[in-house]
Image: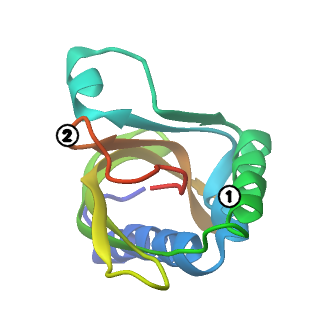
Amino acid sequence: MELGTAIERAAVEDLYFAYAAAIDDDLERWPDFFLPDAVYRVIARENYDRGFPIATILAEGHGMMRDRVTAILQTMVYLPRTVRHAITNVRILASEGPRARVTANFAVYESYPADASRLLVVGRYVDAVERDGGALRFAEKTCIYDGNLVLGSLIYPL
């Protein structure tokens, strides 16, 4: 990746914004944003900062990601909710061969049919992005949520 070009920066931002749209509106597409052997983890900031590997959510590869999607879609029958992701401050930090190290901030909101919308979780992504053919995909996605408590349940991908 040529990190300094506006085209590559725009392509990386497009990846993040399409990722958020898929999680929010078409969850079955979520695994398609990753390489087949990618690692996805959600971890509390305290654990991340201390180097503790304990993740709240861990998915290694498309199979585990698709299992998570199936579980989410089956549990939504009981208490449907809408989730919206806001992603900001996307920054390409470095290039490591075919990979680029990228960070961004996120905020996730949730809404239930009979309740007010609320902020569910905030944090940052620390990711590795690779070009897969003509498309960018995540090789690693680490979602570091601020604080140690999440209001409600953390079942959706961040």
Label ID, residue 147: 2
Q: Counting other residues with Cα less than 10 Å from the Cα at mark 2, is it few (<14), some (14-19), or many (20 or more)?
A: few
Q: Counting other residues with Cα less than 10 Å from the Cα at mark 1, is it few (<14), some (14-19), or many (20 or more)?
A: some
Identify which amino acid the numbered label 2 is placed on.
Gly
In the image, taking residue 74 as reference, residue 117 lies left or right, namely left
Q: Nearer the viewer, residue 30 or 109?
A: 109
Give the answer, above or below, for where 96 lies relative to 153.
above
In percent of width and height, residue 95 lies at 35, 43
In percent of width and height, residue 25 lies at 59, 81
Q: Choose top left, top right, bottom left or bottom right for residue 94.
A: top left
Q: Quadrant of the N terminus?
A: bottom left
In percent of width and height, residue 82 lies at 50, 78
In percent of width and height, residue 65 lies at 70, 47
Residue 133 in view (yes/no) = no
Question: Label 1's element?
Answer: helix
Q: Which residue is mark 1?
A: 72
